[in-house]
């Protein structure tokens, strides 16, 4: 694939100061030129990419049919996604029209550690203690937690992140059960985690942590019915994708106190709010506003990935993906152009379609 001029021109959407700093540090090592745009990619901002060779996008840039048509019309052959998740891209429509590369793993530790941070904070209420003591309030009333040791954590999705969380939870003496569409039996044998059905996990866990991708099969996997079968005062942690949980059902579960704690790094409608400063504006999303009123809900705005190590890894892999594409290298991080699979075994064997 050839570039439009001597350097690869990258139109970089949803650029944050920490992205710009990290990518700028690496630019001297690559034959690329980056134009940073703070805007999300949509049909109104897409024209900024005219003349570019590649668009570089993040989780809330919507690459839908209109954008894909725009890319084809403007001879922009490549989307370089700066994340592992790719549910923001209409892959079905993209097949055989544009190429998509992503960063399959940058720091699974960062996300697993953030999930743990949410659990520990909700349980031991250190966020409340911080505010109290700064205000001269040294009372302990209302701060009682529980020992994590001996409790059951149910991990949904035992990929890179779920596995790290499982090992850490086992390390602090928790019982770890898991559900995965493709269970890793060797991991089960090696670690002492036990795979079970989704319904049993949901029924028997004290803490449920979500680590599977958002697909049509996992959309709203935590719904009214699942919540009704959970233990009373269950803790739900979601650092994966917002739409794994039906927010309306979550709010009902919190109102009836079925759900004792919710730690959310992601939210179904997050693209309108997350990553932006709304501190002097009105939040018109009633569900988000309601979630923020619960004392036992802790929301972070999709920051689980945000460590120095992860940012460096995202930038390196993205630049390697982009430059590799224009050198016509075989790309291990490409979502299959022919069949749309994130890891296409057929392609590895050289005969996908
Ligand atoms: P991974 O691909 O290594 O693991 C995903 C696991 O989910 C796999 O074991 C897979 O078999 C399983 N799975 C697939 N479909 C399933 C289903 N229907 N039911 C149950 N399990 C299913 O992914 P990784 O790196 O562990 O990431 C997990 C998710 O975390 C990503 O999909 C992404 O949405 C999210 N994420 C969030 C970040 C954040 O900053 N909050 C950062 C990075 C990832």
Image (cartoon, grey):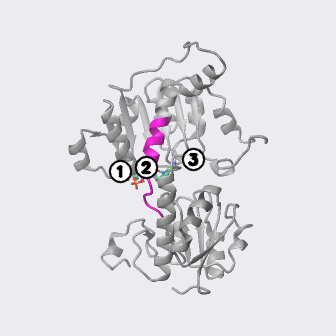
| Residue at horizontal 55 percent and vertical 29 percent from the top | 253
Q: Is mark 1 within 8 Å of ligand 1?
A: yes
Q: Nearer the viewer, mark 2 or mark 1?
A: 2
* Crowd band around label 1 with a 10 angstrom C-alpha radius: few (<14), some (14–19), many (20+): few
Q: Quadrant of residue 27?
A: bottom right
Question: In this rendering, would 191 be left or right of 55?
Answer: left
Q: Position of residue 174 (x, y in %)?
A: 33, 30
Q: Which residues are magenta?
A: 102-117
**Lower sequence index among marks 2 and 1:** 1
Task: Identify the residue position indicated by label 3 in the image.
Answer: 302
Q: Quadrant of the C terminus?
A: bottom left
Which sits in the foreground, 192 or 257?
192
Residue at image position (54%, 87%) is 2
The x, y position of residue 304, in whole percent, is 51, 46
**Residue 333 located within the stretch drawn in magenta:** no
Q: Mark 1 = which residue?
A: 181
Q: Is disc 2's CB within 8 Å of ligand 1?
A: yes
User: Is residue 47 left or right of 152 when viewed as pictured?
Assistant: right
Which of pointers 2 and 3 lies earlier in the amino acid sequence?
2
Total tally of numbered discs in the picture:
3
The question of residue 103 being in magenta is answered with yes
Note whether 251 is above or below 274 in the view shown: above
Q: Is residue 240 visible?
A: yes
Q: Position of residue 156 (x, y in %)?
A: 40, 43
Residue at label 2?
212
Q: Under 8 Å from ligand 1: the CB of mark 3?
A: yes
Q: Secondary structure at mark 2?
A: loop
Q: Position of residue 124 (x, y in %)?
A: 49, 24
Q: Are marks 2 and 1 in contact (CB under 8 Å)?
A: yes
């Amino acid at each position: 694939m050839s570039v439009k001029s001597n350097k690869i021109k990258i139109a970089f959407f949803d650029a944050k100061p920490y992205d710009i700093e990290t990518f700028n540090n690496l630019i001297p090592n690559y034959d690329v030129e980056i134009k940073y745009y703070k805007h999300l990619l949509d049909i109104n901002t897409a024209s900024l990419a005219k003349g570019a060779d590649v668009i570089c996008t993040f989780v809330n840039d919507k690459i839908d049919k209109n954008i894909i048509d725009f890319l084809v019309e403007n001879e922009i052959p490549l989307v370089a996604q700066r994340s592992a998740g790719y549910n923001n891209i209409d892959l079905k429509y993209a097949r055989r029209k544009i190429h998509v590369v992503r960063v399959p793993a940058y720091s699974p530790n960062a996300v697993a550690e953030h999930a743990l941070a949410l659990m520990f904070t909700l349980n031991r209420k250190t966020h409340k203690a911080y505010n109290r003591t700064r205000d001269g309030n040294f009372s302990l009333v209302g701060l009682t937690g529980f020992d994590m040791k001996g409790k059951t954590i149910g991990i949904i999705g035992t990929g890179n992140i779920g596995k790290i969380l499982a090992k850490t939870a086992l390390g602090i003496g928790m019982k770890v059960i898991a559900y995965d569409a493709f269970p890793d039996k060797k991991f089960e044998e090696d670690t002492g985690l036990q795979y079970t059905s989704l319904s049993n996990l949901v029924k028997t866990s004290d803490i449920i942590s979500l680590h599977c991708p958002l697909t049509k099969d996992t959309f709203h996997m935590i719904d009214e019915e699942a919540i009704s079968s959970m233990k009373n005062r269950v803790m739900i942690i979601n650092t994966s994708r917002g739409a794994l949980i039906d927010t309306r059902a979550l709010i009902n579960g919190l109102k009836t106190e079925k759900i004792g704690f919710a730690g959310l790094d992601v939210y179904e409608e997050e693209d309108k709010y997350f990553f932006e400063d709304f501190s002097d504006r009105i939040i018109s999303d009633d569900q988000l506003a309601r979630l923020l009123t619960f004392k036992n809900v802790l929301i972070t705005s999709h920051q689980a990935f945000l460590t120095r190590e992860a940012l460096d890894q995202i930038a390196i892999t993205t630049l390697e993906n982009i430059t590799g594409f224009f050198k016509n290298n075989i790309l291990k991080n490409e979502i299959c152009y022919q069949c749309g699979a994130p890891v296409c075994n057929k392609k590895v064997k050289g005969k996908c379609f």
